[in-house]
Image (cartoon, grey):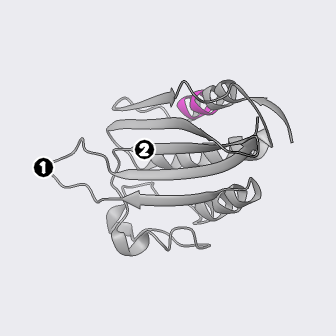
Amino acid sequence: MAPCDLPSLCSSVVNMVKAAVIKNHVQLEMRIDPGVPRQVRTDAGLLSRALMNLVGNAMKFTDRGLVTLGVRAQPEEDGRVRLRFEIIDTGVGIPEPMLNKVFEPFRQVRSEYLKPGGRGTGLGLTITNQIAKSLGGELSAKSRLRSEEHTSELQSHHDLVCRLLL
């Protein structure tokens, strides 16, 4: 683990996803709470890869609205800080029965919930979950399917929680 400028890492992730995915009806934002330390000791490559996957998935499954990469911090007694990376989107959502299964290898949401071109290998969240564990954290998801009447409400929420050294 090496020192890492956390706001720069998050900004790089957002800029890379913006460059790779051009969508006129989707905004991509970054929100870092004031209590988040600027410098942390972590594996920046792994953290970046995990965030790229989560933000990329959110963009892939959002046809209009907003995707947000947020970061919050909670200091711990041992000199570490627990960081919560939240990827929130207004995409199609994940059906409740699938929430626990999306972290399994080769699992994907059924095709009727996906828009055209919205398929992948089914390994991204599995790999991201393994990265979270290697960083001393965990990956979780909560979601609600989008109704036709409420297209702007929160749909999906992925949390990547990591314990990092200050």
Q: Is residue 18 above or below residue 80?
A: above
Residue visible at 55% across and 48% down? 54
On the rendered image, what quadrant is the C terminus found in?
A: top right
Q: Position of residue 58 (x, y in %)?
A: 46, 47
Would you say the residues marked 1 and 2 are in contact, meaning their CB atoms lie under 8 Å apart?
no
Q: Which residues are magenta?
A: 13-18
Does residue 59 appear in this view?
A: no
Q: Which residue reaches farthest right?
A: 2
State the residue position of label 2. 88
Q: Is residue 17 magenta?
A: yes
Q: Position of residue 91 (x, y in %)?
A: 35, 48
Badge 1 marks a residue whose secondary structure is loop
Q: Nearer the viewer, mark 1 or mark 2?
A: 2
Of labels 1 and 2, earlier in sequence is 2
Q: Where on the picture, by quarter, is residue 143? A: bottom left
Q: Position of residue 164 (x, y in %)?
A: 74, 43
Identity of the amino acid at label 1? Glu
Q: CA distance from mark 1 to mark 2?
A: 19 Å
Q: Where on the picture, by quarter, is residue 56? A: top right
Residue visible at 45% across and 36% down? 68
Does residue 104 appear in this view?
A: yes
Is 130 or 108 nearer to us in this picture?
130
Q: Where on the picture, by quarter, is residue 103? A: bottom right
Residue visible at 39% across and 44% down? 89
On the rendered image, what quadrant is the N terminus found in?
A: top right
Q: Is residue 78 magenta?
A: no
State the residue position of label 1. 149
Q: Position of residue 52 (x, y in %)?
A: 62, 43
